[in-house]
Amino acid sequence: MKKLSTLLLMGTLVLGACGQNSSDKGEQLEVYTTVFPFKSMTEQIGGDHVEVKSIYPNGTDIHTFEPTQQDTLNIAKGDLFIYSSDELDPVAAKINKAAKNKNTLAVASNLEEKQLLEHHHDHGDEHEHEHEHGHEESAHDPHVWLDPVMNKTFAKEIKDKLVKLDPENKKDYSKNYEKLVKEIDDIDTQLKQITKNPKRDTVYISHESIGYLANRYHFTEKGVSGMNNEEPSQQEIVTMINDINDLKVPYILYEQNIPSKITDVIKDKTKTEALKFHNMSVLTDDDVKNKDVTYQTIMKQNVESLDKALNQ
């Protein structure tokens, strides 16, 4: 990473010149978020009362994301910054600290320890000591935003925060929140149905991003790359190829923002078929062409892919 501490210091020094928040001017609340589900839920709950932007460029691998000074300035001038938690997202926590925005929301900060999955380094000792991107890592799996049950908790946190910042529109926020929760419940029901009596119990995917789904709906995740996109060793690649062939696994899931060269090798050696899975950390350029894209619309497509991987 490009000297994040220096970048954040620069951002801090210029924050005194920032103007007043948009909420002070009676306009839409200006909200910045990290991953797409937080953005999507905020947009749906906030409706016309909010303008929401993610700090991540389309298609980026968030494991190597390098924030700019402008990111810090935007958050400082905005009305609200939403991310998972200081522990799950150390980079966002540092940006937030430098921005000194008094209105922040770490939606996962109240989760209990038992709700979080541990982060194990499974891809070689060299990755335990040195990572290309230089990011500080969480001790837990950070991909909480794919879990619909957790997202119901996060949605309530977002609704309550918007009401606190803008009590005049409480009725709208509450109505929109109730609609969102019902749709998230529908996704939870679909996932329970496809995992009730699966034909197979293991899903292979380009990197370890679906641990929370696997834990909640009782299947096993096997990632080609590690949780922070650490590359596997040659021995691990060979082992995975042998396991897939022995189990006659028909599919392997490909994610929208994860490099696929190693996954391509495994797919070719095992004659598996590629299935799309959207980890929703960021959108792609194609995603944003659909103005109606939401956490729910993408998750429904993910459910179809998981259904194929587990049952067909």
Image (spheres, rainbow, N blue to C red):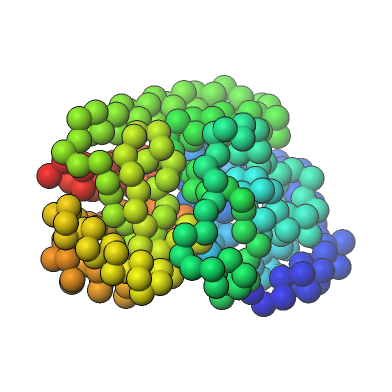
Asked whether residue 223 is in view, the answer is yes
Q: Is residue 118 above or below residue 151?
A: below
Nearer the observer, 225 or 236: 236
Which residue is depicted at the point 65% across and 62% down? 136
Decide if residue 179 is on the left or right side of residue 275.
right
Residue pictured at 62% horizontal, 31% vertical: 112
Q: Position of residue 184 (x, y in %)?
A: 39, 31
- Quadrant of the image for the C terminus? top left
Closer to us: 234 or 266 = 234
Image quadrant assignment for residue 179: top left
User: Residue 138 location in percent, x, y?
Assistant: 62, 53
Please state if 12 lies on the left or on the right of 52 as rendered: right
**Residue 49 seen in the current view:** no
Is residue 169 depicted above or below 82 in this figure?
Answer: above
Q: Is residue 307 left or right of residue 88?
A: left
The residue drawn where x is 24% and y is 28% is 196
Residue 280 in percent (x, y) is at: 42, 52
